[in-house]
Amino acid sequence: MTVRITVVNTLSNSSIRMELESYESVEDIIDTAAEYWGKDAGAYVLRKGSKLLSKRQSIDEINLRDDDIIEMIPDPEGGA
Amino acid sequence: MTLCVKAREYDSDRFDRMRRIDWLDVDNFHKAKCLVVGAGALGNEVVKCMLLAGFRNITLVDMDEIVTSNLSRCVFFREEDGGRKKAEAVAERASGLYPGSEVTPIVSKIQELKEWDFDIVLGCLDNISARLHVNSHARYHKIPYIDGATDGFRGKVQVVLEDGPCLECGMNGSHMSLMEKRFSCTGGGSIFIPKLASEITTTSVIAAVQVREAMKILSGRRELCIKNVMYYDGQSGATTDLEISEDSGCPNHFTEESK
């Protein structure tokens, strides 16, 4: 089954629509969104509601539905 | 029976105001053996908060040297410290903040630390590779681990307890790509650490939250801890707590039963 969701870049507040198949994973969303926004240099996590999505979860497993909104959050690395 | 105190006696106890938070176990902070990994911006603020809160026994690991650009964020460093080892400078200056405390500097990579006999670990690192090392060792030795990270006005704190999700459970391919990139930049076994944006106010907020979570754990109030990661946006002042699921494929959760 195909779902169409919105992925929001929390850094720029811009968003993209993404079409996904049920077998695709959280990793696929991150890769696609990062490539779209040219963000290959950093680490990112995806948030749906109050949960951070696990890389191994498939679209089916996280129960994504049409028009769901997923937030892409840059994961800080620094501290020195 | 009515409690009788001498006038102004309460002002002679350094921790009197903390003891008024009835569930804070200040005496346990005195006894706790603590490991702080990293003596940079976060490490300075974490050690400062820990000493003021009554932590007395801190082992501080960092291999790095002080440079002038550290001075905008590191409370224990001075102009004349250029070239000194960060861990040693913090240990020397910190002793004056809380007499009787002991900050033991270890100038080495965290990967070289052999003994993991601690009650709590606070991560103040600047790269994923070292974080994964601390995460796996803390997990193996069943030591609570509180990791902090910043990037400009953004930051995060993750609380890793003996059970439940660990740091690696929340990571994905983008973290691994970044880690590979850091190694490939040097072309050898060492790691390239880029100059990431950083400023003191966000550093202070994240370090303070790290120490506050340590205080909860050492006061036996784990139910009050962040579950599991807190993201902080210093531009808006917003914080968000996100739950992380335990990843059954994570190597840190591998057990005989999961074979």
Image: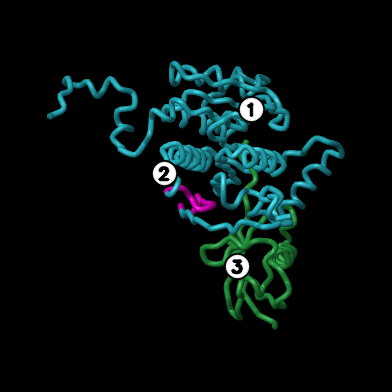
Chain colours: A green, B cyan
- What's the residue at 46%, 40% (across, down)? B217
Q: Residue furthest left?
A: B1
- Say what amino acid the circle numbered 3 marks: Val
**Mark 2, residue position:** B221
Q: Give the range drawn in magenta.
A: B224-237
**Residue B186: image x %, image y %?**
83, 38
The answer to whether B70 is drawn above or below residue B205 in the figure is: above
Identify the secondary structure beneath mark 3. Answer: strand
For the residues beneath circles 3 and 2, the answer to whether they share a chain is no
Residue B31, visible in the rendered structure: yes
Q: Whole-Å distance between the Cαs marked 1 and 3?
A: 38 Å
Q: Is residue B20 left or right of residue B116?
A: left
- Say what amino acid the circle numbered 1 marks: Val
Does the segment drawn in magenta span residue B233? yes
Does the segment drawn in magenta span residue B131? no
Q: In which quarter of the image is the C terminus of chain A?
A: top right
Identify the secondary structure beneath mark 2. Answer: loop
Chain for disc number 2: B
Q: Residue B61 carries which label?
A: 1
Q: Which residue lies furthest to the front in this view?
A: B257
**Residue B253: image x %, image y %?**
66, 50
The answer to whether B10 is drawn above or below residue A24 in the figure is: above
**Mark 3, residue position:** A8
For the residues beneath circles 1 and 3, the answer to whether they share a chain is no
The answer to whether B125 is drawn above or below residue A5 in the figure is: above
